[in-house]
Amino acid sequence: MLVGGVDFSGAKTVPNDTWLVTAEITDDGMSVKNVKNTGSHGLAKELDSLKELSCVAMDFPFSVPVAFLKFLAKKVEREEFQEWQTVAETLVFMNFDQFKQYVDEYEIEGLRYTDSKAMRVAKSPLHTVNPSMVQMTFYGMKMLATLNPEKYAVLPFQEDRRSKGCNIIEIYPREVLYILGLPDVGYKAKDKKNHDKAHALRKEIIEGLIYIKGDARYQECPRLHIDNTLKGAIMANDHAMDALVACFGACLFHTNPAFFADPWDVANENMLLEGWIYGPGKLMPAK
């Protein structure tokens, strides 16, 4: 039984830095099997080749704010969207320049309900600069729309396939790290002068996941098992690091779903169109 984590790139260039980390679920955690830069163009094919996949966590917005969807429906001259699948299929038949034009015309970088409720407030899917979330959201949603519905369920939009297929969940690595008491800033090297510090923080994160059961708060969390070669590959690249954290979140969601807030318990139906960031918030100590 495998789980996966994806750090998705919205870059137009092919190939690009879209990283996939896969791990096998073990008796006490997860054992990393592969660390690979698939590029966004090769991700779906790579996932299809992994027959034992049970859950994959992906780091990009699965949708956009409802207010923007109402604006978009008017621009494409259709009735308001009632389900996420229709939104995703609309993007399949749209090129990026068209979508970006609508975003620029809208002007508002609004948040989804789930963005504002994350313990580390997420950027708007309509954020346009440094980094551009617009491209990541657009290309990510198009990729999700192409996945085989007989194998995959994109949550919370589709029926949970925990026992008979593979769940796809949106995850925010910074939030997972924060909840687990690990460094959630500074591990991405922005320039050469911060390289050594960022590398040291990535090492600290990996060590924290390896020895996580040493903290009484996280006794029920999966323990990370990883060989030195794969550990070195992840420490060398912050995108691979985010993919590892996403993979850890996928394992935790698959084995201990009670740690995650259920979007169906939230009194906000917008999540049926906007999506949901799955974070193990119930691991946080009570205040």
Image (cartoon, rainbow, N blue to C red):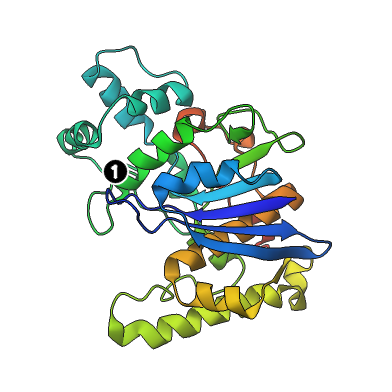
Dividing the picture into quarters, in which one does residue 121 lie?
bottom left
Residue occupying image coordinates x 43% and y 21%: 86
Q: Secondary structure at mark 1?
A: loop
Q: Picture coordinates of residue 286 (x, y %)?
A: 68, 62
Name the one closer to the observer, 111 or 141: 141
Q: Residue at label 1?
A: 126
Name the one closer to the observer, 85 or 219: 85
Label 1 CA crowd tier, 10 Å (few <14, some 14–19, many 20+): many
Dividing the picture into quarters, in which one does residue 216 lie?
bottom right
Residue 9 lies, with reference to residue 97, above or below; the image says below
Q: Is residue 191 left or right of residue 266?
A: left
Residue occupying image coordinates x 69% and y 75%: 210
Q: Is residue 210 left or right of residue 205?
A: right
Residue 147 lies, with reference to residue 25, above or below; the image says above
Dividing the picture into quarters, in which one does residue 64 lie?
top left
Q: Picture coordinates of residue 162 (x, y %)?
A: 72, 38
Q: Picture coordinates of residue 263 (x, y %)?
A: 60, 37
Name the one closer to the observer, 213 or 239: 239
Tell me, yes or no, if residue 287 can be seen here: no
Instruction: Report the quarter where the C terminus lies.
Output: bottom right
Tell me, yes or no, if residue 87 can be seen here: yes
Q: Is residue 110 left or right of residue 256?
A: left
Residue occupying image coordinates x 64% and y 32%: 151
Q: Picture coordinates of residue 11 (x, y %)?
A: 30, 51
Residue 229 lies, with reference to residue 131, above or below; the image says below
Q: Amino acid at mark 1?
A: Leu
Count up the numbered dots: 1
